[in-house]
Image: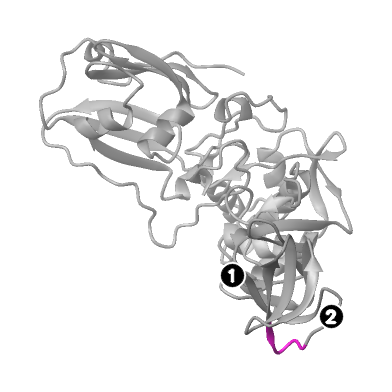
């Protein structure tokens, strides 16, 4: 674990003492990567697979000191939604102890302190108590998707909807939503193992294990599966990444910028882990986000960093880098006062794609440029850890 020498990111040290920039001046931000940068990068995996690496080799590269082990017979409870006024579904053959006709639509609605099974038109069929469950299918949930296993509705302050699904079925619903199905099989198998491991290593959230979005991994259910991704799941069936005999949290993100990061530098305050250390990621350059640039006007920059300095914004001085050039801590310097902030705080305040950033003062008219995602770009979301921002998807 090391940090690099602090850099002055505003036209060098002299810019920090310069007077406020003329009206119309602004900031150029050069960056690399998209996401937290911990564990594997999707585009790095893609590049390694294209260059002949198999999924076991790829996993060993990104998750140091680990080996593959096996799990069987697991299920995952996935939160699909909460606070719903009703849940309409079809393709179920039973719910709340009542036989259903799978070609018909039904719904769960709140009732008292629990859930009521009702017809599509809203007529009560049976009170289910605090929890209602439907099985059969795969079950189609209106406006959400089609899911294997069971859907479970919990009452109280709006319905919480979860999907209890076998682990392999869950992974089949994750891989096509995290990696392109057209990518090589070694890349898809790598993602299958990482997704499976992440699911069973997650600490859980009370009534469910994982979210269906970038707070955990993006899960679209059976309706999003493809033959290629299903084949990758089957080919790696039951395999998980383990350290000293236990499955570990396999964080991953879209784009590393060329080097991944130690977990404690990306997620400030996290415990260092021997399998989550930064490594060189040479094929990440295939990503459209390997490098990126954003411009902000002086006024926008000052507004977004409001409260972190006083007076005129003069510069940003990096206090600590991670094992990559990602910012761990920096000082936002104003003419009358400064403050120390974390790299993730800067990223979030400025709407950037990672903490791998360089700031430069520029003159002349500057228009704020957005960092929109190119059409068709995959921005994986697994392993979002403490802060569920869109940085990892």
Residues at marks 2 and 1, CA–CA distance in whole angstroms: 23 Å
Residue 321 is marked as: none
- Residue beneath label 1, please? 144
- Image spot of residue 26 (x, y percent): 20, 31
State which quadrant residue 302 falls in. Answer: top left
* Figure coloring: one colour
**Which residue is at a point 67% across and 64% down the rendered structure image?**
173
- Residue 238 visible in rendering: yes
235 or 356: nearer the viewer:
356
**Which residue is at a point 56% across and 34% down the rendered structure image?**
260
* Residue 34, magenta (yes or no): no
Mark 1 Cα-neighbour bin, 10 Å: few <14, some 14–19, many ≥20 = some
Mark 2 Cα-neighbour bin, 10 Å: few <14, some 14–19, many ≥20 = few
Instruction: State whether residue 392 is above or below residue 320.
Output: below
- Image spot of residue 313 (x, y percent): 25, 20
Residue 98 is marked as: 2
Q: Nearer the viewer, mark 2 or mark 1?
A: 2
Instruction: State whether residue 49 is above or below residue 228.
Output: above
Q: Secondary structure at mark 2?
A: strand
- Image spot of residue 111 (x, y percent): 70, 67
* Residue 103, magenta (yes or no): yes
Q: Secondary structure at mark 1?
A: loop
Query: In the rendered structure, which segment of residues is drawn in magenta?
Result: 101-105
- Image spot of residue 215 (x, y percent): 60, 47
């Amino acid at each position: 674990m090391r940090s690099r020498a602090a850099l002055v990111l505003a036209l060098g040290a002299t810019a920090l003492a310069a007077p406020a920039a003329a009206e119309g001046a602004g900031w150029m931000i050069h960056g690399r990567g998209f996401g937290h940068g911990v564990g594997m990068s999707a585009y790095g995996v893609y590049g390694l697979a294209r260059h002949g690496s198999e999924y076991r080799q790829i996993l060993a590269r990104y998750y140091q000191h680990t080996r593959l082990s096996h799990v069987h017979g697991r299920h995952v409870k996935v939160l699909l939604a909460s606070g719903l006024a009703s849940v309409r579904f079809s393709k179920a053959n039973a719910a709340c102890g009542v036989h259903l006709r799978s070609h018909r639509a039904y719904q769960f609605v709140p009732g008292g302190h629990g859930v009521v099974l009702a017809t599509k038109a809203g007529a009560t069929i049976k009170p289910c108590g605090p929890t209602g469950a439907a099985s059969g299918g795969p079950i189609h949930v209106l406006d959400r998707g089609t899911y294997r296993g069971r859907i479970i509705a919990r009452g109280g302050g709006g319905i919480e909807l979860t999907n209890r699904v076998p682990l392999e079925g869950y992974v089949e619903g994750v891989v096509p939503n995290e990696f392109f199905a057209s990518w090589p099989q070694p890349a898809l198998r790598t993602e299958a193992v990482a997704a499976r491991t992440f699911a069973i290593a997650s600490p859980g959230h009370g009534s469910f294990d994982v979210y269906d979005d970038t707070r955990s991994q993006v899960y679209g259910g059976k309706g999003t599966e493809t033959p290629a991704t299903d084949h990758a799941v089957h080919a790696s069936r039951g395999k998980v990444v383990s350290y000293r005999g236990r499955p570990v949290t396999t964080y991953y993100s879209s784009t590393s910028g060329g080097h991944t990061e130690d977990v404690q530098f990306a997620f400030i305050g996290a415990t260092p882990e021997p399998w989550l250390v930064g490594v060189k990621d040479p094929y990440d350059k295939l990503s459209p986000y390997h490098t990126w640039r954003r411009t902000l006007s002086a006024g926008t920059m000052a507004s977004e960093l409001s409260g972190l300095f006083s007076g005129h914004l003069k510069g940003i001085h990096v206090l600590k880098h991670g094992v990559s050039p990602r910012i761990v801590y920096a000082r936002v310097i104003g003419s009358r006062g400064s403050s120390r902030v974390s790299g993730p705080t800067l990223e979030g305040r400025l709407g950037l794609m990672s903490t791998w950033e360089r700031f430069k003062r520029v003159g002349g008219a500057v228009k704020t440029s957005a960092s929109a995602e190119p059409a068709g770009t995959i921005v994986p979301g697994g392993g979002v850890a403490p802060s569920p921002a869109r940085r990892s998807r």
